[in-house]
Image (tube, rainbow, N blue to C red):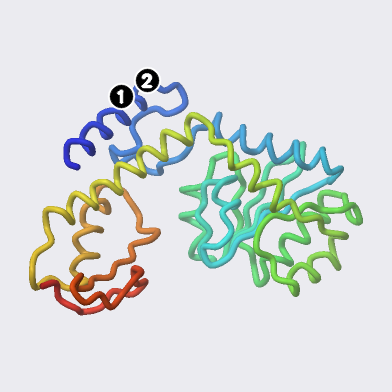
Amino acid sequence: MTVTSKRLHMAVTMRHRAATTIDEPVLLGRYPARFSRREMQRRRAALLALLAEHDLGQLVVYGANRTGSAVGWLTGWPTTREAAVVVSDGAPDVLYVQFRNHVPQARELADPQVTVRWGGGSTLDSVAAEVTARGRRGRPVGVIGPLSHHHAARLADTTGPLVSLDSAYTALRLVKSAEELDWLRAGAWLSDQAIGALAAGLRPGITERGIVDIAERAYVPRGGTTHICYVASTPMHAPERGVPGQFPSPRELR
C-alpha cells in the first residue's frame, strides 16, 4: 500500500505540474486551494445554459448546514451555516453568507469573481431583494439546493414561480472535467495516507477514538479535511458490529 500511495502521489504531482489550469500541486499547501478561473467559468456557463434551456431569467443556489453542494461547486465556498447565490446572465454572481463572522473567510475562499455579502437578518429576504433588484420580478426563477417547503413558498411570494433544477445540476456533475479528476486524485492520495497510517499504527490497546486520531493525523497536516471518518472494531470470532459507526467508541483493540 505504501508503494501504491507513493506512486499515486508522484503521478498526481507530475500531472499538476503539467496542467495548464492549475499553477501548482494542490497537495503542497496552497491557500486558498481554489479551482482555476477557467474551471469556474466553465461551471457558470453550464448553469447559464440550463437557465436558457428552461427559459429562466435567474437562478438561486442554496445550501445550509453543509448541505447543498452546488454553492461550493459554483463559488468555492463550502456552505457553513447558510449560503445562497443569485445567478443571472450579464451580472456578477452574489453570494450571501450567514453568519456575519463567516463573511471574511468566504471572501478569502470564494472565487474572486463572486461578490460576497452578509445575508443580513434573513438570507432569503436578501436573496429575494437581489432577484427583484435585477428587474425580473414575476418571471420564473430556477432553484438548486435543499430549500424547505416553507422557505420555497416564502421566496416564491416575492420572486415569482420557482423551477427546480436539482436533477439537471446533478446530471452536469456526472461528467468531470480534467481539472476535477486531478483533484479527485489528490483526495484519493490523502485517503491513502490515512489507510497507510492505520496499517502502520494499529496495535492492541488502542481505542476506536485512537484509530480516528491516527487516520486524521495522516492527512490534516497536508491540508485534508474530514468528510467521513467512520470506524467500528469487532472480534472476528464473535462479530458484534456489521457497519462502521459514525461515533467512535472507547472499545480497545485486542
Q: Which mark is residue 182?
A: none
Q: How far apart are the two marked residues, 1 and 2, measured between alpha carbons?
A: 6 Å
Q: Residue at x 26, y 34 (%)?
A: 9
Instruction: Look at mark 2 in the image and give the residue it sits on.
Output: 18
On the image, the x and y values in percent for residue 117 come to 61, 56
Q: Residue at x 75, y 36 (%)?
A: 49
On the image, the x and y values in percent for residue 48 come to 74, 38
Q: Is residue 214 above or below residue 153?
A: above
On the image, the x and y values in percent for residue 209 come to 22, 72
Instruction: Using the rendered view, name the quadrant where residue 244 is placed.
Output: bottom left
**What amino acid is labelled 2 in the image?**
Ala
Instruction: Look at mark 1 in the image and give the residue it sits on.
Output: 14
* Of the pair 125 and 219, the residue shown nearer to us: 219
Q: In the image, 164: left or right of 190?
A: right
Extreme residue toward the right, this view: 138
* Of the pair 190 and 155, the residue shown nearer to us: 190
Instruction: Using the rendered view, name the quadrant where residue 55 is placed.
Output: top right
Q: In the image, 85: left or right of 203?
A: right
Extreme residue toward the left, this view: 204
Q: Is residue 131 above or below residue 48?
A: below
Q: Residue at x 21, y 52 (%)?
A: 218
> How many numbered marks, from 0 up?
2
Q: Is residue 2 above or below residue 233?
A: above
* Of the pair 114 and 237, the residue shown nearer to us: 237
